[in-house]
Amino acid sequence: MTGAEWAAVRPLLPVPGWLRGRGGQPEAYCHRAILDAVRYLVDNGIKWRAMPADFPPWDRVYAFFRRWRDHALVKEFHDRLRSRIREGEGRDTEPTAGVIDSQCVKADSVVGSDSRGFDGGKLVNGRKRHVVVDTLGLLLGVMVTAADTGDRAAAQVLLGQVADAHHRLTLVWADGGYTGPLVEYCLARLALVLAIVKRSDDQKGFVVLPKRWIVERLFAHLMRTRRLARDFERRTTSAEAMIYWSMILLMTRRLARPRPQPA
């Protein structure tokens, strides 16, 4: 991280339990060094044991990653960064609209058969990432499943989680794969309007569809993060945590970006 990035994220970091008087052993390495190591791994796609010697030992970095994953601290940190960016854009911290979509990725050999599948439509043997983003393209929720999991079945669970976390959310755009009973379910059970954005039959070639391009831009960012070009994680919770870390990379750089001064 640059000095500007560290200055932006340091006040938003979760406070360790030992600093709150809740017991536990003080950490041996500073948060900035550990964060830099995790960011390096996610951005460059290296193995844990290939961590460069400039960073803390790989097992200490992995222990930090695992602790933040299991205690949802990475999501807490991510959500604080998202709120700060929304405030900087003049938006309310809680979104009222979002976009949902999914992305299939090939899985590495370490991914077990219990969490991988074959998507007959995309011809991908691996996993599927289901995401909900706000209108700025910032992540609201993610769920990783086997690639043969239906979009509607996964969306029913994911939208329920997102609606519980963001009570002001009332409208979600989706593509034609989410039509059917899911529309009525969202309206009756979640108080969400699921608006389907379809491609016209008269359109030929590449066409930017309203709202759907927002979530496609997020997928493009994830694929530029080399650790996410394939799914290398044994557990789906680790795969979800890697997506949060990828978005943390994006948001910290955005927060540190100098803002133009008014003339």
Image (cartoon, rainbow, N blue to C red):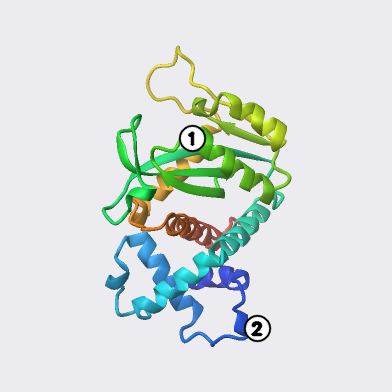
Above or below, comparing residue 47 to residue 114 in the picture: below
For label 1, the residue is 151
Between disc 2 and disc 1, whose residue precedes?
2
179 sits left or right of 160 in the view: left
Q: Compared with residue 33, is residue 196 higher up or lower down, i.e. above or below?
A: above
Expressed as whole percent of the image width and height from the top left, the position of residue 242 reads 43, 58
**Residue at the extreme top:** 202
Residue 112 place in picture, x, y as percent: 33, 53
> Where is mark 2, residue-wise?
22
Q: Could you tell me which residue is drawn at 33 percent across and 79 percent down?
A: 54
What's under tag 1, amino acid-wise?
Asp
Q: Residue furthest front?
A: 114
Quadrant in the picture for the N terminus: bottom left
Residue at 44% x, 38% y: name it: 149
Q: Is residue 147 visible?
A: yes
Disc 2 to disc 1: CB gap under 8 Å: no
Q: Amino acid at mark 2?
A: Arg
**Which image quadrant is residue 233 in?**
bottom left
Label 2 SS: loop
In the drawing, does residue 36 fall left or right of residue 112?
Answer: right
**Neighbour tally class for label 2: few under 14, some 14-19, many 20 plus, Cα within 10 Å:** few
Q: Is residue 13 left or right of residue 169?
A: left
User: Gap between marks 2 and 1, in whole Å?
Assistant: 42 Å
83 over 135 or under it: above or below? below
Q: Is residue 135 visible?
A: no
